[in-house]
């Protein structure tokens, strides 16, 4: 199938910090060969400094970051490339900013219990997001709405099972060609 801007797909692996967005996105990237962007790497330094200090980001802080992600996706689409992007995408307005990229934007929302997520955050190394911001992220999170393309997956099962469920839903429900 020839890729055109009309059949470009952007898969946004979303959820609060600690849900395993990066691990799942890497699995999908290696499986599909879609262009990959780690949303955390696109944050301005000022955002990383705030989060590292335990200060929640505001909508104003997030706006340029979301615009940069949408710009990256737009650039990839212009080259005929499908994408996989990690981004918390906590609010519908943030997801709307991402949906400005040409093509279909499908949100894959990873969810789990607060206790499981906090435990994961506590045990990971080298990430700037402190566990103290989990409550802020959970309070900010707005579930996907009916007018948004996307689905939710529980993070409790092993990663292999989550990846299988993600791939199955993307192909069976959304008709995404993952090869």
Image (spheres, helix red, strand yellow):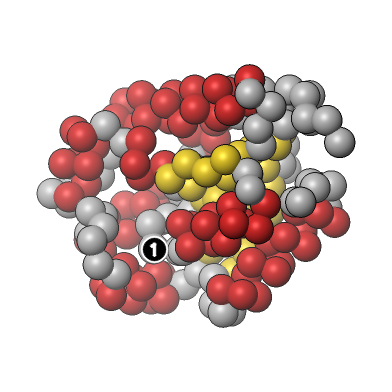
Q: Is residue 150 left or right of residue 155?
A: right
28 relative to 82, above or below: below
For mark 1, give the secondary structure: loop
115 relative to 129, above or below: below
Give the residue at x 37% y 30%: 65
Q: How far across and how far down the image is residue 68, in percent?
A: 42, 26
Give the residue at x 31% y 36%: 43
Quarter containing the N terminus? top right
Comparing 126 with 140, the one in front is: 126
Where, by quadrant of the figure, is residue 110 drawn? bottom right
Give the residue at x 26% y 58%: 127
Q: Which residue is mark 1?
A: 18
75 relative to 30, above or below: above
Q: How far across and how far down the image is residue 146, in percent?
A: 72, 42
Q: How far across and how far down the image is residue 167, in percent?
A: 72, 60
Comparing 154 with 73, the one in front is: 73
């Amino acid at each position: 199938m020839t890729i055109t801007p009309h059949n470009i797909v952007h898969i946004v692996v979303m959820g609060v910090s600690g849900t395993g967005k990066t691990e799942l996105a890497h699995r999908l990237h290696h499986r599909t060969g879609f262009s990959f962007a780690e949303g955390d790497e696109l944050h301005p330094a000022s955002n990383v400094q705030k989060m590292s200090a335990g200060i929640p980001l505001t909508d104003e802080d997030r706006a340029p970051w979301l615009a940069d992600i949408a710009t990256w996706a737009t650039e990839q689409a212009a080259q005929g490339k499908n994408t996989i992007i990690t981004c918390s995408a906590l609010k519908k307005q943030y997801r709307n900013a991402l949906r400005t990229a040409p093509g279909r934007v499908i949100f894959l929302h990873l969810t789990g219990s607060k206790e499981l997520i906090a435990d994961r955050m506590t045990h990971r190394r080298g990430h700037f997001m402190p566990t103290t911001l989990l409550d802020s992220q959970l309070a900010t999170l707005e579930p996907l709405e009916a007018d948004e393309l996307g689905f939710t997956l529980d993070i409790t099962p092993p990663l292999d099972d989550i990846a299988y469920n993600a791939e199955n839903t993307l192909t069976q429900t959304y008709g995404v060609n993952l090869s």
